[in-house]
Amino acid sequence: MGVLGTCCRCAGAVAVIPVAVILSVLLETPTITKLEGQQFDAPKDVETAKASYDATEESKEGPSAPRMGSGSMFDRIAFVYDATNKWMSLGLDQHWRKTMVQECLRLERDDKVLDLATGTADVGILVGERLKQLGDGAAGAQAVLGVDPSPEMLRRGVSKVDDKGLTGIVRLVKGDAQDLSSVQGIDAVGSVSDPSAGAADNSIDKISMSFGIRNVPDRARALREMSRVLRKRPQSRVCILELSLPSGETFLSSLARGFIMHVVPFIGKVATFGSGSEEYKYLERSILRFPQPMDFAAELGKAGLPVESITSFAHGAVNLYAATPGA
């Protein structure tokens, strides 16, 4: 009876928490924190500093298995990634991405856009469609460069780009956010080409990254790469959308916190029929380790990308950082 009771309580929590969170998030007004002109020190927390240098983990299967957080890890869950994202975000992931593209990036007609951790190209497609609108039905060749370390995610993205009629506008490549000097093209069947030149210094107008920075092994290095390739002009923007653990200071924040810690791993296990349970447990741990919003804003500033504002959704579970090139 004790085991049965525990199972029932777990099932009840999984059922009740999502419903409560859905209702609260739908009724929520995002919180915007303005930071423009503020000066603050980089985070001093030791664990945060360590995470900046290697945010990935060795797999429980041993050193020969793909590291948790690596492109190879995402290859293993690529078949359910889009669907699981929608379940885990309560169907709001596209809304958050659209907010980043439509409000944060401030796209202009001739922009060159870099989308890091592009995955299956959800953001790259939104950017490509917006640039076509701004160009009266046309956009520059390879106006959007989507970079990701996972071939399985990318090949699915290539098919989505083709289906949207954005081939030639959105280019997806295999690459590393820590070193954007070299990339490899990929097609819809997953064939990867030889390395070619990536993003040059001062060549990009806008940079987007959604739900990927916490998986980069050396976060500081990736932020410096963003600063290197970004054009130093007032219109240039860096917009990063990322998860973090809500404070739990309010009742609704506590619900969102419980959702991340208990429901997210459960959904991942169910969606992958148990095969991706470790991957989704890692994703939960990566959220727990990621710096709090003001600390990550400090990291961006230290890399030469001062943050103007932080927009918080889902009671602090999702944060949108808007940064510009430093002086």
Image: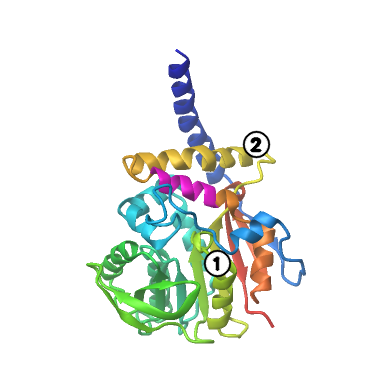
Classify the position of the C terminus by image quarter. Answer: bottom right
Q: Which mark is residue 251?
A: 2
In this rendering, is residue 11 above or below 43?
Answer: above
Magenta span main SS: helix
Q: Position of residue 54 (x, y in %)?
A: 55, 61
Q: Residue furthest front?
A: 63
Where residue 117 sits, quadrant-wise, is bottom left
Q: Nearer the viewer, residue 315 or 5?
A: 5
Marks 1 and 2 close (CB-CB < 8 Å): no
Q: Position of residue 252 (x, y in %)?
A: 62, 39
Q: Is residue 222 magenta?
A: no
Q: Residue furthest top?
A: 1
Residue 97 as seen in the image, left or right of residue 277: right
CA distance separating discs 1 and 2: 34 Å
**Stretch in magenta:** 277-286
- Nearest to N terminus: mark 1 or mark 2: 1
Q: Residue at x 63, y 56 (%)?
A: 291
Task: Say if residue 292 shows up in the picture.
Answer: no
Task: Say if residue 150 shows up in the picture.
Answer: yes
Q: Is residue 285 magenta?
A: yes
In this rendering, is residue 11 above or below 239?
Answer: above
Q: Position of residue 236 (x, y in %)?
A: 57, 80
Q: Residue at x 39, y 67 (%)?
A: 149
Classify the position of the N terminus by image quarter. Answer: top left
- Identify residue type, mark 1: Asp
Q: Position of residue 277 (x, y in %)?
A: 39, 43
Q: Could you tell me which secondary element the residue under label 1 belongs to?
A: loop
Q: Could you tell me which secondary element the residue under label 2 belongs to?
A: helix
Residue identifier under label 1: 218
Label 1 Cα crowd, 10 Å radius (few <14 / some 14-19 / many 20+): some
